[in-house]
Image (spheres, rainbow, N blue to C red):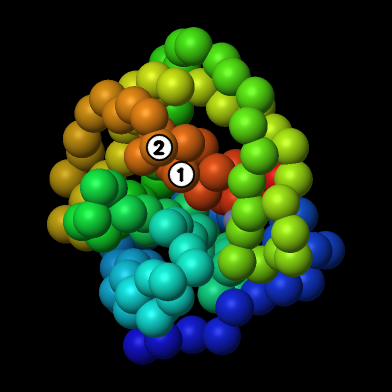
């Protein structure tokens, strides 16, 4: 279900709790809400639809992907950039890594480890920051 976008920076600044299998339907809400904003948004975290659970969705070169409890295990090649956010107006400077190694659980709560690079890696870092209550 498409959900309204949270824009309250105080609430966006609070860290999210670990997701459990009971939170799997929230993943579908995130996929639906991202699809509804595909013209202006490449990723979302659950707190952007008002749910403080560690769930993210992102566009991986045209394919939407969902992660539960994502964690960055390793990051390399730091660079300076600027980003926007559906919950904010305008863009802000930030630092990201070009390559990351991530662990997460899928919608069946099976654990995965994968590496990402480039823009997809940047989106994942932005969304994991949201899970930690960090807004660019
Ligand atoms: Zn954002």
Task: Report the disc number at residue 114.
Answer: none
Q: Residue furthest right?
A: 10
- In the rendered image, residue 124, in percent from the top left (x then y), is placed at 44, 42
Q: Quadrant of residue 100?
A: top left
Q: Quadrant of the N terminus?
A: bottom left
Q: Which residue is mark 2?
A: 119
Which residue sits at x=63%, y=54%? Answer: 84
- Disc 2/disc 1 C-alpha distance (Å): 6 Å
Q: Which residue is mark 1?
A: 123
Q: Which one is nearer the viewer's eye here, 50 or 7?
A: 7
Above or below, 24 against 54 in this view is: below
Q: Which one is nearer the viewer's eye here, 21 or 89?
A: 89
Q: Name the element at disc 2.
A: helix
Q: Is residue 5 visible?
A: yes
- In the rendered image, residue 127, in percent from the top left (x then y), is placed at 51, 48
Which residue sits at x=50%, y=59%? Answer: 45
Q: Badge 1, how many Cα within 10 Å: few under 14, some, many 20+?
A: many
Q: Quadrant of the C terminus?
A: top right
Q: Name the element at disc 1.
A: helix
Q: In the image, ligand 1 is in what quadrant? A: bottom right
- In the rendered image, residue 104, in percent from the top left (x then y), is placed at 31, 40
Contact? badges 2 and 1 (CB < 8 Å)? yes
Above or below, 36 against 30 in this view is: below
């Amino acid at each position: 279900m498409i959900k309204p976008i949270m824009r309250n920076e105080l609430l966006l600044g609070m860290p999210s709790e670990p997701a459990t299998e009971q939170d799997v339907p929230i993943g579908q809400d995130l996929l639906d809400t991202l699809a509804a904003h595909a013209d202006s948004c490449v990723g979302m975290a659950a707190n952007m639809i008002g749910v403080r659970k560690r769930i993210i969705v992102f566009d991986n070169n045209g394919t939407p992907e969902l992660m539960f409890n994502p964690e960055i295990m390793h990051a390399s090649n730091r660079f300076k950039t600027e980003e926007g956010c559906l919950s904010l107006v305008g863009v802000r400077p930030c630092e990201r890594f070009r390559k990351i190694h991530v662990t997460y659980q899928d919608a069946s709560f099976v654990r995965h480890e994968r590496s990402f690079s480039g823009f997809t890696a940047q989106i994942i870092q932005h969304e994991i920051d949201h899970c930690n209550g960090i807004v660019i």
